[in-house]
Amino acid sequence: MNLHQQLFSEHTPEDHLDIFWLGQAGFFFRTDAGLSLAVDPYLTDCGERIKNYKGFKRLTPKLIQPKDFCPRYVLSTHHHFDHLDYDAIPDIAAQGTSEFLAPESCCTLMHDEMGIDSQRLTALSPGDELHLDRDLTLYVFDADHGAMAPEAIGLGIEYRGLRIYISGDTGFSPEIFRTVHKFQPHVGILSVNGAFGNLTGTEGGQLAGLLNLSLAIPCHFGTFAEHGGDPASFISSVKEHAPTCTPFLMAQGERLRLNAYDYSDSQEQERL
């Protein structure tokens, strides 16, 4: 079974959430009702094309073609090519089924340069809360990606009590993370390549402890030589700074299936 079949033909069991790692900072989420959303999917070679530099040559396989990728929602945390795939987004949009959620600057780019209808674009700002269906709510947090992307955001997903924090590209910012802590995430998906304004592996482990995560997933490494990244240091740091948290290293295309009811009110009391 190829990835397209796994993403769009399989069924998620009742009360579960399926999470697939697409590579780099890209993740695909699917609920038991079939609602699908993708965050920062990087599916093409546009980085090397745009930068014209082998340091941004894609080193990982392309597991699915953009023309075959049709989630209900596509979210981008900022405008950099590995989060807003300039070559993939037009092909995804051409299928006519996806809506696009991103910071205002990204929405402007998608409208003006890619020709996406404004009715399919939703601008996101820190503090926003969007109910994508009755069981899934999206929260928007600030991120500190420096002058390279001042509009960068992080995201929170809440599904039947299960809360997931997606850092997007960010450095270590205690002020931002105090806000995220109030969200009380169970799972963290953290960019930890330690370059271009992102957390190091060590800082990712420290953040897992600060947020009292139950499960921590590293990302944003392995796709480009220029980006670097050491997931082993992240795993070691989680063990040191967040001993009750499980570090979970995913392979590209791998599925993680979470039962929302494993994160019940009784377990919440144990976390507090």
Image (spheres, helix red, strand yellow):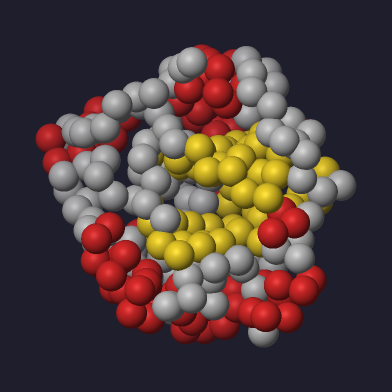
Q: Is residue 142 left or right of residue 221?
A: right
Query: Where is 222 relative to 262, above or below?
Result: above
Residue 72 appearing in the image = no
Q: Residue at x 45, y 40 (%)?
A: 21
**In the image, farthest residue toward the right:** 134
The answer to which of 237 and 23 lies nearer the viewer is 237
Q: Residue at x 82, y 43 (%)?
A: 133
Q: What is the quadrant of residue 233 in the picture?
A: bottom left
Query: Where is 272 relative to 99, above or below?
Result: below
The answer to which of 256 and 64 lies nearer the viewer is 256
Expressed as whole percent of the image width and height from the top left, the position of residue 225 reads: 16, 44
Q: Is residue 252 left or right of residue 84?
A: left
The answer to which of 21 and 145 lies nearer the viewer is 21
Which part of the image, by quadrant, shows the C terminus?
A: bottom right
The answer to which of 48 and 157 lies nearer the viewer is 157
Q: Residue at x 59, y 74 (%)?
A: 180
Q: Is residue 24 left or right of residue 18?
A: left
Expressed as whole percent of the image width and height from the top left, the position of residue 13 reads: 72, 35
Q: Residue at x 47, y 70 (%)?
A: 245
Count of all numbered marks drawn on residues in the image: 0
Query: Where is 6 relative to 217, above or below?
Result: above
Expressed as whole percent of the image width and height from the top left, the position of residue 188 reads: 51, 62
Expressed as whole percent of the image width and height from the top left, the position of residue 91 reads: 51, 18
Residue 9 appearing in the image = yes
Q: Is residue 254 left or right of residue 50?
A: right
Q: What is the quadrant of residue 47 in the picture?
A: top left
